[in-house]
Amino acid sequence: MTMFFILLQAAQQQGGGMSFLIMMAVIFAIMWFFMIRPQQKKQKEIQNFRNSITVGSQVVTAGGIYGTVKSVEDADNTLIVEVARDVRVKVDRNSVYATAPVDNKA
């Protein structure tokens, strides 16, 4: 009779282990769809934006500098950005994050 209880407990423990693995897989799937996948999508959109920057685009750099792209240098992956009249800054393409809003006051 005690052998029966030992086998019953062993069967219950194995079933518990399987449900634990299923639960961990579900948690990973939830994390993938709500955290990892949207971040990858956002990074892909940012990279597509950086690759589509052309002369005349209004941009904002990582340092918060607003300017207009005056030239694109593909050889060293940089941009020449004009931040004021006759003031140009060379920045890495990866430091550009967003398009600047159009200033209608000027």
Image: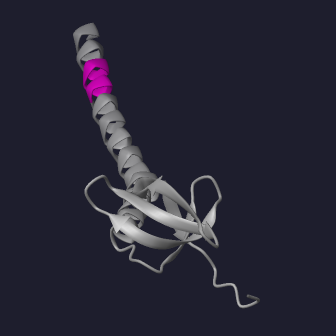
- Where does the image place residue 15, in percent across and percent down from the top left? 28, 32
Q: Is residue 21 left or right of residue 69?
A: left
Residue closer to the observer: 37 or 62: 62
Q: Quadrant of residue 87?
A: bottom right
Q: Is residue 11 magenta?
A: yes
Q: Is residue 102 above or below residue 4?
A: below
Q: Main secondary structure of the magenta part?
A: helix
How is this picture coloured? one colour
Q: Is residue 90 above or below residue 48?
A: above
- Where does the image place residue 90, in percent across and percent down from the top left? 48, 56
Q: Is residue 42 left or right of residue 83?
A: left
Q: Is residue 78 magenta?
A: no
The residue lying at 46 percent from left, 73 percent from top is: 70
Which region is colored magenta?
8-14
The residue lying at 27 percent from left, 22 percent from top is: 8
View extreme (bottom): residue: 104
Q: Quadrant of residue 103?
A: bottom right
Q: Is residue 40 left or right of residue 103?
A: left
Q: Quadrant of the N terminus?
A: top left
Q: Is residue 95 above or below residue 8?
A: below
Q: Quadrant of the C terminus?
A: bottom right
The residue lying at 23 percent from left, 17 percent from top is: 7
View extreme (right): residue: 105
Residue closer to the observer: 43 or 7: 43
